[in-house]
Image (spheres, rainbow, N blue to C red):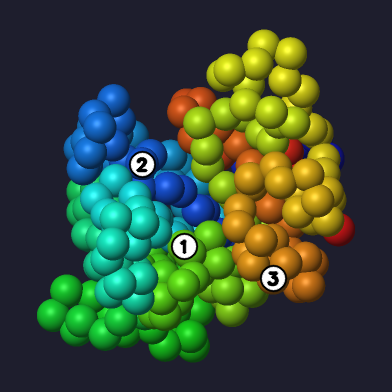
Amino acid sequence: MTEANPDQPLVTYKRVMLKISGEALMGDQGYGLHPPTVQRIAQEVKAVRDLGVEICMVIGGGNIFRGLAGSAQGMERATADYMGMLATVMNALAMQGALESLGVFTRVISAIPMDTVCEPYIRRRAIRHLEKKRVCIFAAGTGNPYFTTDTAATLRANEMNCEAIFKGTKVDGVYDKDPKKHPDARRYETVTYDEVLQRHLGVMDASAIALARDNHLPIIVFSLDEPGGLRTILRGEGTYTRVHG
């Protein structure tokens, strides 16, 4: 990325996908939603939208229910995954409420039809929402069990013709090992899709990485806890790791 001109609200991408985990909405709690944290993330999204960037989101559901964990405890896997998808709808509605309280028009679009609370997924309609500068939050994953919200984010990013996926995490990029446990952990400035897969770096699951690689979609890994971090990176600055071909 090139250095941004400080005299201009120049951004490096026109349309992006923001992928965050459900756990990011917990704050310091061990479960559920922490409204101040949801509001803080909404303010970050608004700041990006105000730069003129068209933004869509996928939020995980692990703060409420994780299908894989339910399956590990004896639940039938498909049923557990559907329950996890419903958890993502709850998170999406919470984020929609926070964004609209800031005056940002938002649409929750679900892969599982539930017309009373959100729109069904129709690709052309979703693209039109983005063109009108509405934030689109894609919920319920792909609508199919056995696929993660990482894969859903990559799929929707490709369908929406996004120029990059921004993966918000607890650390400021991709490291060769957990930096919270290992002080000598090394952060990658850039890393290829194949290196992520071969070294098991844990950026996203393998199917999401492969889908991004096959469609030449870069993944930007950054810290969601850094105030203004997303906006800074979109201006070509800040600290992050770029996953590319």
- Compared with 119, 68 (above or below) is above
Q: Position of residue 89 (x, y in %)?
A: 27, 65
Name the amino acid, label 1: Thr
109 or 237: nearer the viewer: 109
What distance separates the C-alpha of mark 1 from that of mark 3?
A: 13 Å
Q: Residue at x 74, y 13 (%)?
A: 184
> Quick one: SS at disc 2?
helix
Q: Residue at x 13, y 80 (%)?
A: 116
Tell me the residue that label 1 is attached to.
149
Q: Neighbour class for label 3 at 10 Å: few (<14), some, many (≥20)?
A: some
Q: Residue extending furthest left?
A: 116
- Compared with 37, 156 (above or below) is below
What distance separates the C-alpha of mark 2 from that of mark 3?
A: 24 Å
Q: Quadrant of residue 158?
A: bottom right
Q: Please report whichever mark, 1 or 2, sits nearer to the chain's N-terminal start.
A: 2
Camera sees residue 83 = yes
Q: The N terminus lies in which quarter of the figure?
A: top right
Q: The C terminus lies in which quarter of the figure?
A: bottom right
What distance separates the C-alpha of mark 1 from that of mark 2?
A: 13 Å
Tell me the residue that label 3 is attached to.
211
Name the amino acid, label 2: Glu
Q: Position of residue 88 (x, y in %)?
A: 31, 61
Q: Neighbour class for label 1 at 10 Å: few (<14), some, many (≥20)?
A: many
- Compared with 118, 218 (above or below) is above
Q: Which mark is residue 43?
A: none
Q: Is residue 223 left or right of residue 210?
A: left
